[in-house]
Structures are given as structure tokens and as C-alpha cells.
Amino acid sequence: MNFRTQQAANRRKTIGLLVGMGVLMWLLVYAALTYFGTSTAGIVPIAVGIALISVWGSYYGADKLVITMTGAKLIQESDNPKLFNLIQEVTIASGLPMPKVAIVVDTAPNAFATGRNPEHALIAFTTGILDAMDRDQLQGVIAHEMAHVANRDTLVSAVAATTAGAIAILSDILTRMMWFGGGRRDRDSNGNPIALVFSLLILILAPLAAVLLKSAISRKRESLADATAVAFTRNPTGLRSALEVLAADSTVVRQKSTSVAHIWIESPLDGKSVSKLFSTHPPIAERIAVLKAMEQQS
Amino acid sequence: MEIFVVLSVIALLAIFFVAQYNRLIRLNISVNEAWAQIEVQLKRRTDLIPNLVETVKGYAKHEQSTFDAVVAARAKATSASSVADVAAADGMLTQALRGLLAVAEAYPDLKASTNFLSLQEELSTTENKVAFSRQFYNDNVRSLNTAVKTVPTNFFAGFAKVTAREFYEVEDPQDRKAPNVKF
């Protein structure tokens, strides 16, 4: 598979997963109406509203918010001319505007990108990654981060987080209503037991399914960013050997908050991750294998 | 009733025409911008050369033929204007610079000097920038040429005064896109 088919496949899968998220939301609303009756319809806009406000505030100010959450410090060209040279190379290859650049003082090698659009993009590197990598590897990492910017992944993850958040809030409210015996006013009029059991199952399982879908979307965006990075540099070897450096290194970034875990190039939660289904990144070995396949192509 | 149908069909057609026309114009502008970027990067490289040659000369006085090759290639690069000429001069200059750096390999004092190290970083980033701007230009030319030659945009190309553009092709045996030999 070359990078073009990779990009197309990952874009398709993202759309499929986002549609799945919509279907899940619809199923949950349907279950609520079946179980509690049409009087609960008013809760839906409330849940969506809360999710919208909480996610889109952080989406709009993503670049500034993430700086405080990760302890990143903005730097100028004179602070690290070589790094800026490398970033300029990738902006020329991608046609993107020059992003803001930040450094996180941490020996663990890692990097991330954020910002609501390419004009407000910010890419950050730990001091560890700058020390550990050579020119080509660093170029691969920068291309991966700029690929996130080009693919608008801050927007995609904000959409995913909003839907998943709305589903969680909705199902939370409904489960509470169930415990306190509220609702179910039309108990007699809607007596189909199979529909009721089915609805109950959906109410309980929806938040879990939403988290799984959200993680799956994040993984697809990571694979897409790898493919787009190769589209920028036409050099899968650089990114591949950079990922090998990351895989060989066992130190992880000291997180101030796990809520920004998904934005790093290598997941800082690796050790704690329950299983592949919940992780925000594809296994690093798998990413290396895909890039190796691209190297054979060229 | 019919009048609304007719009017909406006309409106839809107008929107369609405008969209095709604008797409061609946009693609053409992207190609122009990509070309400007190539010129900026090539200029950066030619500006870098006198300093580099002087630095290497300081340590390696007897490599006059290499210096001459670089200076000649630089002169050609500054006078070229058409896409094919610029590309040919660019390829020659890349080769000549490679020769200059190969000469530098033989002089440990030169290789260790901080001036040379910073010039080397400048030169390798500039080479990458030239290569990437070339790649970006060719990608844009590919989109434009596809649009100019395929339905439905091809019908509007004459009207928008947009024509297929020339690819930027560098003759360089050591180009990064050369196939890798694997064992």
C-alpha cells in the first residue's frame, strides 16, 4: 500500500466511525424514548448543549490551553535555528503556514500538534526528542505533526469528544432517573418487554461504546497522519526510524493531565493502557510495519 | 410554476459554471505560488554559495577546478528563466555543490570549523527546501494539468485562459527519488 491508498482508507474509516457515533446517539435517544416515554425528549438538547460548551471552549482555545496543560514554552527561531529550518522544510513540502513552535522540558522523547486550524497551529517537542533524533528522523516527526494540522485532527477529535460526551451525559442522567424511579409514566401503554430490555441494555452500554468509537477514531487519525507525513516528505524511512527510536525508549512524558494524552505522537499512557481497543494510538510496531511496506513501494 | 423550475435550473447551471471557472483559477494561482517558492529557495541557495566557497578556500586552496565548477553553475542558475532552464541549472548546481562538500571531506580542520558546520546545516536545509518546493510545485502542476485535460473543467480552460503547465524535472542521477537497491 502506498501513502495515497493509506490516506484514502483512513479517511473512509474515520467517516464510518463518525457515522457510527451518530447512529449510537440516535439509538440512545430512541432507547430513552422507549423506556421513559416521550416526556424525556427535552433532556437530549441539554446533554448535547453541555457537551458542546465543554468541548468547543477547549477546541477554540486549543493552542493556548494545551500549552498550560503540558507546560510547553513557546520558542523563537533564534532559540533553535536547526529545528526551525526543519519545520520550514515541511511547511514548504505541505504548503501549510508556519506554525507556532514550543518546547516541553522533559527527557522522554515525544511531540504533539494542536490548534483549531492551520493558522492557529502549534507544534511542540520535548527536549528529549530533540536530543535523541537525527535530521531525517526529526523531519519525519515534524511531518507527522504537520499532517495532524493539515488533516484538521483537532476538529475531528473535538467532534468525536462532543458526541461521546453528549452520550455519556445523556446516559448518566437517564440511569439516575431509572434509580430514582422517575419517568416511565406511560408504563401501561408501552409494554413490549423485549423493547424495554433492549433499551435498558443500550442505556447501560452506550457510554462504553462511545469511548471505544472515540479511541478508534483517534487511532485512525494517527495512521492517517503517518500516511500524510509520507505524502509530505516522500521519505517513509525517516518517520519509521523515528518511531523505532520511540519504541526503544521506555521513558514516558510526565503528564500534568491525562486528558491531553491523545495529542502526543507516542501515547504517554502505554504502560497503563488496558487493551488495544481503548488506546488512542495504534501499536507502534504496527505503524512501523505500515511505513516499511511504503518503503518497499518507493 | 414552470418559471421557477426554469429559473432554478439556470441558477444551478450558473453556480456550476462559476465553480469550475474558480477551480481552474485557484489551481493556476497555486502553481504560480509554488513556482515563486522555488525561486525564493533557489535564490537562498545562490546567496549562500560565495560564503561557502570562501570558507572552503581558506582550508583547501588547491581545489580550484571544483570552485570554478560551482561558480560557473551559480552564474548559469542566476541567468535562467524558463522552467526547463531553471531546472537544468538547478541540477548542475546541486551536483557542483556535492563535489564541493566531497572536497571538504578530505580536510579535517575545515570539517571541524564552526563556520563550516553552520554553513553545512544551512546548505542541507536549503537543498531540502529546494527539493520540497520542487515537489510541491510538481504536485500543483499535476492537479492543474489534470483539471485542464479532464471533463468538465477542460471546457472552461480556454475561457479562464488557463493552460497545462510544465513539470519541473531535474536530471540528477542521485536524486532522492532514485530507486533504492535492497538486498
Image: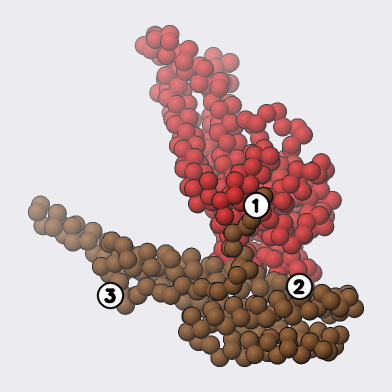
B176 with respect to B18 (left or right): right
Q: Residue drawn at (18%, 61%), measured in percent from left and top?
A: B10
Rendered red, the chain in question is: A
Asked where in the image residue B23 lies, by quadrant, the reply is bottom left
Count of all numbered marks drawn on residues in the image: 3
- Label 3 environment density (alpha carbons within 10 Å; few <14, some 14–19, many ≥20): few
Kindly identify the amino acid type of the residue bearing the numbered disc 3. Answer: Gly
**Which dot, 3 or 1, sits closer to the camera?**
1
Label 2 lies in what chain?
B
Residue A5 placed where, x, y %?
A: 49, 48
Residue A20 placed where, x, y %?
A: 47, 33
Q: Tell me the number on the disc at residue A224.
A: none
Q: Residue drawn at (79%, 43%), measured in percent from left and top?
A: A248
- Mark closest to the chain's N terminus, 2 or 1: 2
The kind of secondary structure element at disc 3 is loop
The kind of secondary structure element at disc 1 is loop
Q: Tell me the number on the disc at residue B182.
A: 1
Q: Tell me the number on the disc at residue B158.
A: 3
Label 1 lies in what chain?
B
Kindly identify the amino acid type of the residue bearing the numbered disc 2. Answer: Glu
Which shade is chain B?
brown
Kindly identify the amino acid type of the residue bearing the numbered disc 1. Answer: Lys
- Mark closest to the chain's N terminus, 2 or 3: 2
- Mark closest to the chain's N terminus, 3 or 1: 3
Per the image, the residue denoted by label 2 is B121
Q: CB atoms at circles 3 and 1 under 8 Å apart?
A: no
